[in-house]
Image: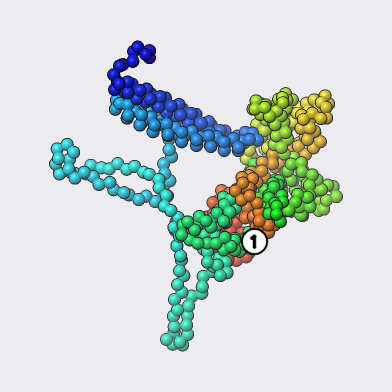
Amino acid sequence: MPISALPDDVEALKRLVLAREADLADARARQSSSEALIAHLRLTIEKMRRDLYGQRSERGARLLDQMELELEELEAAASEDELADERAAAAADTTVRSFTRKRPSRKPFAEHLPRERIIVPGPTACTCCGSTRLAKLGEDVSETLEVVPRQWKVLQYVREKFTCRSCEGISQAPAPFRVLPRGFAGPSLLAMVLFEKYGQHQPLNRQAERYRREGVDLSLSTLADQVGGCAVLLRPLYDLIQAHVLAAPRVHADDTTVPVLAKGKTVTGRAWVYVRDERPFGGPDPPAAVFHYSRDRTGDHPERHLEGYCGIVQADAYAGFNRLYASDRRPEPLIEAACWAHARRKFFVLADVAAKARGRLPVVAPLAIEAVKRIDAIFAIEREMNGVAAAERLFARRQRTVLLVDDLEAWMRTERARLSRHAEVAKAMDYMLKRWAAFARFLDDGRICLSNNAAERALRGIALGRKAWLFAGSDRGGDRAALMYTLIQTARLNEVDPQAWLSDVLARINDHRARDLHQLLPWNWAPNPVALAA
């Protein structure tokens, strides 16, 4: 608007400025809403693709986390701008219509949630004529989700005594089993403490502070004592899960670092995981994961973990596994199946155009891009066969995949001969070519997966939790953590709520026959609906 067209009246100028501010607030609200909607749709599409085809790239999990964080920030900003628009419109003129954001449709609240009716008193007289002759026509119900703060209670087990009038003997019911001898905590409390520490990565000192704010004083040493007792109590279930995993024809193996507190410093220990998961080839046995802890990463540890095991091991190219594949290994050598995801990652780093744009790479390698495309074509066929029986997978691989694998090998050997041994792409090619028999083994066995992602997913919780608990207190603490990670991760693999399962197991295990302990394993566990309702 030109200056000459502006009014001379001060009040008119104020109204004009307020109207312009309202227009700007409306534009900001619309822009924020559009950005939030786009982020929501991108996240939805990415999740649908992940559900349909599995993980799209090595950075799939981190991409989802980043997109969810971005959506969280954009939604909050859109709400702020929408409220600011409403206030600006109200200040400018009542006739100015503020922008109303279109939010994604919300799912209805779950039916099992209890409902509390709060009656808003109706009018006692007609708002039109003032008459008091009113009759109820109906009602409108709007629901708001609310949370009740956690309630603590003390259970008193009262055992009445009775005396016999005939023999003067005294009769009394036996004392109920406690989870731990002389223990004061009930199974639900113990399950919550264990799951918070090992499933949600909340150290005991933080839990003790939170409980103290809620009016319950539980010292750190008291909680640690309960955790140690539960570890002993749950050890038989750990042994059963370990036996189940090592009875599989194929296991995934991997490890990650675990900082361990030492004198005046921390040392780097290792957490090892072995996963049994037959779902990719439609196997009948349930999935499970067993964890081990060690102070270092020598090859002696996987040899001890897999002592007596005979079958297929899917793992990366860690040299500590080499003695397991040796011909003189007893009772027999294990069969090595290499991970294509690890091999693809080496090419993907060199082909990452985004990293090049940020200046992290001097140049994007065209050979790496071509290798990623060829490997992705193999992965695309594998996604179509996910969950198919092993025989059908093997037939499809021999019909469709073997040509792609042969072409990839021939292409890499041709291009490798032209490269210097110092080239980064040459190192990525050597990683595969030196172990080509292990990489191509999936073409001869339908049970073998193309990647070792099952083990990496099992270790993801430890990698995320390291920033919360910082380090393990000792080697004994690392062993306890391995036991609890085994129980919690196995429950998750079988789509069982770990905390509910632990609570029920702790309540029943002392009174359960040893020969029937397998009934308490996550894949055999049936929740008690009465206990859950309570």
Please tell me which residue lies in front, 12 or 76: 12
Residue 386 makes an appearance in the image? yes
Look at 44% across and 76% down and name the residue there.
Answer: 160
Residue 211: image location, x then y, percent: 50, 57
In terms of secondary structure, where does tag 1 sit?
A: helix
- Residue drawn 51% across the image and 63% down it: 186
Residue 217 position, x and y percent, is 50, 62
Work out which quarter of the rendered image holds the N terminus and state it: top left
Q: Quadrant of the C terminus?
A: bottom left
Percent of width and height locating residue 496: 55, 51
Where is mark 1, residue-wise? 236
Visual colour scheme: rainbow
Q: Is residue 158 left or right of residue 434?
A: left
Instruction: Please rate how many residues cluster around mark 1, counting C-alpha atoms within 10 Å: few if below 14, some from 14 to 19, many from 20.
Output: some
Name which residue lies at 68% across and 49% down: 258
**Residue in front for this viewpoint, 513 or 456:** 456
Question: From this viewpoint, which residue is outermost toward the right?
Answer: 328
In the rendered image of this protein, does residue 55 appear above or below residue 519?
above
**Circle count:** 1
Q: Is residue 516 above or below residue 290?
A: below
Residue 511 in the figure: left or right of residue 315: left
User: Quarter of the image holding residue 419?
Assistant: top right
Q: Nearer the viewer, residue 526 or 67?
A: 67
Q: Considering only vertical position in the picture, is 464 above or below 396? A: below
Q: Is residue 516 visible?
A: no
Q: Whole-percent x and y of residue 203?
A: 58, 54
Give, as a three-letter code, the residue at label 1: Pro
Identify the image quadrant of residue 502: bottom right
Q: Residue at x 68, y 29 (%)?
A: 360
Q: In the rendered view, does 347 fall on the left or right side of 502?
A: right
